[in-house]
Amino acid sequence: MADLLSILRSRFGFDSFRPHQAEACATLADGHDCLLVMPTGAGKSLCYQLPAVARGGSALVVSPLISLMEDQVGKLSAQGLNAARIHSGRPREESRQACFDWVEGKLDFLFISPERLRVPGFVEWLAKRKPGLVAVDEAHCISQWGHDFRPDYRLLGGRLDLLRGKGVRHDSGELPPESSQTPVIALTATATPLVQRDIIEQLGLHDCKRLIHGFRRTNLGIEVVELKPSQRADAVLEVLVGARPSRPQESGPEVRAPLPAIVYVPSRKECEALAARIAQSVPCMPYHAGLSAGDRDRAQAAFLAGDVSVIVATIAFGMGIDKHNVRTVIHTALPGSLEGYYQEIGRAGRDGKPSRAILMWSWADKRLHEWFMERDYPPVKDMRALWGALSNRATDLESLASELNLDVSTVGSRLDKLAAQGGARIDAEGYVTRGGDKWIDGYQRQLEHKRDQLDRMLNFAQGHGCRMLALLNHFGDPDNSRACGRCDVCAPQQCTLKSFRAPRPRELAVLRQIMDALRGRDDLSTGKLFRDNFEQHMKRGEFEDLLGALVQNGLVTTRDDMWEKDGRVIQFKRASLTDAGLEIEDDLATAVMLPQASSSFSAPEAAQATKPSRSRRSRKAAEKVADPLPGPDPALVDALKAWRLQQAKREGVQAFRIFGNKTLDAIAAAKPRTRDELLNVPGIGPAKLEAYGDGILEITRA
Ligand code: ADP
Ligand code: MG
C-alpha cells in the first residue's frame, strides 16, 4: 500500500495532515471499520478519500445533501480523480451512465443519496462491483436520537452487507471470507455517545474503531447569562450596537460584542422585530423559514459578502454556510438540545480568532419548551385515549377530533406519533384504523429522549464548571482534562454581558450554611443538602445558584454521580469543600461574587413601559408576516392524493409516510412552479424535495 503521506501530497496537494486525519486514514486503509466524529470543517472528507485512493478500486459514498455531493465531486474531479454522483437533480441518462461506469470499475468515487436505496434493483446493481470502501457521510441522520433523522438512512443498515460486497462471489464462484469485507467509515460532526452507539449498531460495523476528536474550540469564549425574556432584545442591542435603550443618555455607544454576528431567536416574529431594531444602527437582515427562498438567499449572500453585518435567524440559518470571520453568536433563548447549540455556536470564529458565544436563558425557557413538548409529545395516557378511540373500522381525523374533543391538528400530530410506533394505521386517503398494541415502549423512549435533551441543555445553562469542558464531556471527546480559560466561569472578568455583585445579607447567610453543612460531611449529595437544610425556605434554583457561586469561586467542588432506578440511570451531584474552602474563615462576603444580569437591565419593565406605542406597532408588523396562506385548490388536492397513492404503492409504504394531508393541502395552496418555491412549502425539506420534487412539480405545473 502506498505511503499515506505521499498520497496526501501528490494526489490532494496538502503538505501535512490535520489533527487526527492520519489516524483515521490509517485505520481505514488497513481495512477496519471506523466511526469518525469531528466538528464541521475539521477535514473529515479526506479521511475517506485518501484511504480510497490508497486501497484502490472504487469508493461508494452515501451522502444526504445534493450540495455536499456536488461540492465533493467538483473537488475530486479537480484533483484528477474520476468521481460521479447519482441523485434526483441529475439527468437520468447521466445517472445510468454512472451506474455502468461503476460496474465497469471506471470510477474512483460514486456518490449516492440515501433515497436511491429505495429504488428497486438499484442496490443489487451496484453490488455487482465490490467497492474499495464505503463511506456514510452525515451518519447521525441514521439515528432517531440524532438531530436530523432521515428515515431513508435506516435502509442502509439492511443494504450495507450487499453494498460492502458481502454477496459478491469470486470468479471461482466462492464467497469471500468476512475479513476481506470492504471497510466502512461513518462520518459525522454531531453525535452524542448514544447516537454513536446507534450508528454502529444500525450499520452493523464490525470491531469498529471510534475516533471522537476536535470538539475543543480554543478561540471561543462561551458566556451564559440568565435574563428574563423581556430583557433579551435590549441586551442584544446593547452588546451588538452599544445602544442602551433603558438608559440612553448615561454613556455613549460602546460596542462590546464584535461583528459580524449571528443572533438566533426562537420565532419568526421575534426574528423580524429584532432585525428591524438592529437595522436602525447597523446593516442587518432577518432570516427564517417563512421568507421566500429568494429572500433567504439574498440575506445569506449579503452576509457572506460582508454587506450585512448581523443576521437575525431562526434555526433555519447556517447549514453549509462558510463564513470564517463571524465574531459573535448570540442565542436569545434556550435551544432544545446541546447538539444543536454546539453546531450553531460552531459558526463563530472559524478563522481561529477570538470569538464569543452568548446564551441568554431563564427558567421561563424551560416552561416554554415543556409546553411545546406537552403539545407535541403528550403523556402516554392521552396517547392511550387516542389508541382506544381507534378500531378496525376506518375513521377520519375530523370524527376522531370531535370524539376526543380535541382540535384536528392536535389529533393529527398525535396520530403521526402513534403511527410511527405502529399503534395506528393511516391509509392513502387519510382514514385511520387501530394498529398493534406494542407502541407504548417506543413512544416512551422517544419522550424520555426529548426530555433528556432538554435536561442536558438546562444542566449546561445552570452549570458551574467550564462551559467548553461541559460540551466536550457531552460529546464524549477525551480531550477533557483542562478548562478553557475563556468562558464566563473560567474568566468572569472578560464577560461581555454578564456582570457580578457581592452577596446580599440573606444570600450570605445561606452561603455560610452550605459551607457549614459541608464542613461536617464531605461528598454530600446536593439534593440531600438542599432537602435537609433549605427546602423549607427557598427554591431549588436559588440554592443551586448560590452553591454554584461557591464552586465558581473555588471554595466548593462538585462531581457527577448516578444511581439506577427501574432500569433508568438517574444523575446527581455530590459536593465537597476544596482546600481553599476548608481554610477560609469569615470573609465569605468578599470571597464570593454572584452573577447578575447586566446592570442596564435592572428596571426592564419600566423601560418598556415608556414605549408602548412602538412595541404595539412592531407586534402588528410581525403579525402581518404571519399571514395565513390562501386556501388549497380542491382539484389539485385530489390530483396530489392520487399521485401519493401511486407513489405509496410503488414504495410499499403507508401514504402518510410520503406526505401528510396537511402538506398536500399546503402544496395545493402554494401551487409551486419551481423547486425553490416547493422548498418553501411547510413540510417540504431537502430530502422530500429530492425524493418527490419532480413528481409534484409535474402536477402543480400542469
Ligand atoms: P468536514 O467534512 O469535516 O466538515 P471537509 O472535509 O469539508 O470538512 O474539509 C474542510 C476543508 O478543509 C476543506 O476545504 C478541505 O480541503 C480542507 N482540508 C482538509 N484536510 C486538509 C489538510 N490536511 N490540509 C489542509 N486543508 C485541508
Ligand atoms: Mg463533511
Image: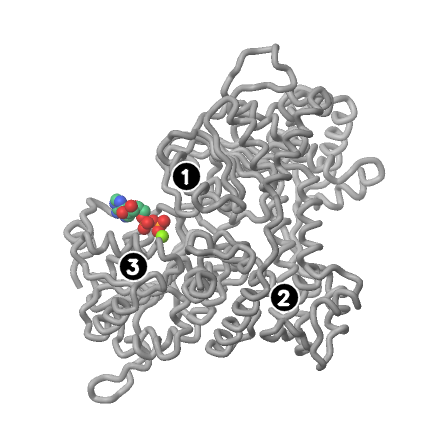
Give residue 390's position: percent from left, percent from top: 73, 75
Q: Split into 4 quadrants, where in the image is the C terminus?
A: bottom left
Q: What residue appears at the point 66 percent right and 45 percent down from the top-left corner?
A: 574
How packed mark 3 is, by other alpha carbons closer than 10 Å (few <14, some 14-19, many 20 or more), is many
Name the amino acid type tagged 3: Tyr
Name the amino acid type tagged 2: Asp
Q: How many marks?
A: 3
Residue 412: quadrant of the picture: bottom right
Residue 578: quadrant of the picture: top right
Q: Which mark is residue 382?
A: none
How packed mark 2 is, by other alpha carbons closer than 10 Å (few <14, some 14-19, many 20 or more), is some
Q: Which residue is mark 1?
A: 298
Mark closer to the observer (1, 3): 1
Q: Which residue is mark 3?
A: 48
Give residue 494's position: percent from left, percent from top: 51, 24
Name the amino acid type tagged 1: Arg
Query: Circle 3 sits in a helix, a strand or a loop, which is it?
Result: helix
How far apart marks 2 and 3 lie (CA) works out to 37 Å
Give residue 288's position: percent from left, percent from top: 52, 43
Pointer 2 with pointer 1, Cβ within 8 A: no
**Camera-nearest residue between 407 and 265:** 407
Query: Circle 1 sits in a helix, a strand or a loop, which is it?
Result: helix
Q: What residue appears at the point 31 percent right and 65 percent down from the top-left corner?
A: 86
Pointer 2 with pointer 3, Cβ within 8 A: no
Q: Earlier in the sequence, mark 1 or mark 3?
A: 3
Give residue 301's position: percent from left, percent from top: 38, 38
Residue extending furthest bottom?
173
Q: Is residue 448 left or right of residue 70?
A: right
Q: Which residue is mark 2?
A: 416
